[in-house]
Image (cartoon, rainbow, N blue to C red):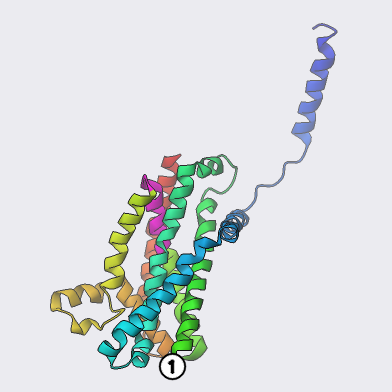
Amino acid sequence: MTTAAAPEQLEQDAVRTVLSTSARPSRPSGLTVSLVFWWRAMLKIKHVPEQLFDVTAFPVMFLLMFTYLFGGALAGSTGAYLQEVLPGILVLTVAMITMYTGLTLNRDIQKGVHDRFRSLPIWRPSTLVGPLLADVVRYTLASTIMITLGLVLGFRPDAGASGMLMAVALLLAFAFSLSWVWTVLGIVMRSENALMGLSMMILFPLTFVSNVFVPPETLPGWLESFVSLNPVTILVTATRGLAHGHAVGTEIGVVLAISAALVAVFGPLTMYVYRRKA
């Protein structure tokens, strides 16, 4: 070794010694990282508030349109129809909004954002769990707007505020679980337009071919059978029951079981396709 190279080698050895002996920061927990990505999603809403158009205008438009178009014909008065249709439209609106989870994820993947996330030494699912938790805030906002408008129009839940809160909590649990379906599709679909088209093909039959607007008994027999087994129908029945104080213990149990099954199936499936996408 030459005398010129000796000081350089000593300097490199000193740097290695410092780097090897210095304490490394502890790896953040999965909860911490999930909250970081939750906050990232909330900041996106703050900087682009137009994203909230679907959770503000959509509920108002649906409630006013269906209440005043069909209320008199189906229930004799808009006031009577409002008591039944508001919980149904609440479920319909939040269920429709859930598809934006997949659209946002697909958009980020196409931009290459998740390629950078995968290189970080963090709990991998947190990049998906955080935005899903942020979407729960969107669902809550949509529910609040619709219930507030309903109260102004004359909606009065027989079970009071506590019953309405339980109904919203059940709806949020189902919406969070349903969002996992769209995360899978958001990863595997190649374009945002294709994902939106497929989401609509799934959501429209589930939400409109249900008991949101009319009782299943008024439908043809073959259609009544489908409507009765529709998960959205069961959720609407449970939501109405909680809001108006009816006994719906069976329906609540079924909704919770469906929600758990959706997470159990589509949660691991999401991570599987997410890793294969890397």
- Quadrant of residue 2 within the rendered picture: top right
Magenta stretch: give its range: 178-191
Tell me if mark 1 has few (under 14), some (14-19) or many (20+) residues whose alpha carbon lies within 10 angstroms of its own. Answer: some
Q: Quadrant of the N terminus?
A: top right
Q: Is residue 151 above or below residue 24?
A: below
Find residue 62 and report its horizontal and vertical position in percent.
38, 75
34 falls in the magenta region: no
Find residue 7 and report its horizontal and vertical position in percent.
85, 15
Left or right? Give the position of 58 relative to 73: right
Residue visible at 32% across and 93% down in the picture:
77
185 falls in the magenta region: yes
Helix, strand or loop for disc 1: loop
Residue visible at 48% across and 71% down in the picture:
56
User: Residue 23 versus residue 216: which sits nearer the camera?
Assistant: 216
Residue sitting at the far left: 221
Q: Is residue 211 above or below residue 42?
A: below
Residue 77, visible in the rendered structure: yes
Find residue 19 and report its horizontal and vertical position in percent.
76, 32
Residue visible at 39% across and 79% down in the picture:
63
Q: Is residue 246 above or below residue 251?
A: below
Left or right? Give the position of 30 relative to 262: right
Q: Which residue is mark 1?
A: 158
Residue visible at 42% across and 63% down in the picture:
98
Assign the magenta stretch its main secondary structure: helix
User: Residue 155 versus residue 71: which sits nearer the camera?
Assistant: 71
Residue 252, visible in the rendered structure: no
- Quadrant of residue 241 within the rendered picture: bottom left
Residue sitting at the far top: 2
- Quadrant of residue 87 within the rendered picture: bottom left
